[in-house]
Amino acid sequence: MAKKTYAEKLKDPRWQKKRLEVLSDAEFQCELCGDTESTLHVHHKQYIKGHDVWEYERQQLACLCESCHENQHDLDVRFQDCYQGFLLMALAVKMKFIIFWLDFLVWKSRWIIFMSKCYTSAVMMLQITGEHYDETPFISVLPKRLA
């Protein structure tokens, strides 16, 4: 069986029943402005993936006049744009933070490699020259957890 389109789902008897319940609960007036003369729509406050239009709880639906319904969708679009902008900004900040720490770790690892090369070179030089090597001055400047 082919999947129903949204328009076909709105003609389904289960949606028609749910729609009448919402309109009746709202006493056939717009829940935002109180209009009783304009065409009334049942607005889904949010859509949940996998739910059919009639599978929502009453508090997830609103009875709105045509004008308020259109305004609500405009607000939803503006909110979605702002929210996506916020997410992109947060992602950019997070990426800068991650890049900062990666740079720090690269710098730190390069510093450790450099210091170990210096230490190795110094030890080798002392061994070549045959001079006595005392580790005490080197160890005394290391943090206690490394010494």
Image: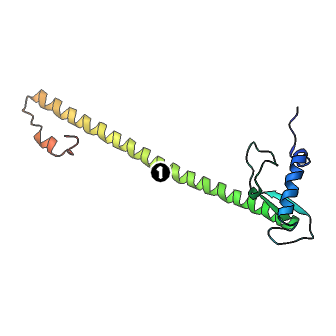
Q: In the visual, does 76 lie left or right of 114?
A: right
Which residue bears the numbered disc 1?
Answer: 97
Give the residue drawn at x 82%, y 72%.
33
Q: Picture coordinates of residue 27 (x, y %)? A: 86, 67
Numbered disc 1: secondary structure = helix
Quick one: 140 or 37, which is closer to the camera?
Answer: 37
Side of 127 relative to 30 (left or right): left
| Viewer-closest of 112 and 53 | 53
Q: Tell me which corner region of the image, top left, top right, bottom left or bottom right, holds residue 85.
A: bottom right
Q: Is residue 11 above or below residue 40?
A: above
Residue beneath the point at 84% across and 72% down: 34
Picture coordinates of residue 144, whole percent (x, y): 20, 44
The count of marks equals 1
Q: Amino acid at mark 1?
A: Phe
Q: Quadrant of residue 23?
A: bottom right
- What residue sits 53% from the left and 54% below the top? 93
Residue 136: image x %, image y %? 11, 40
Q: Residues within 10 Å of mark 1 (few under 14, many from 20)?
A: few
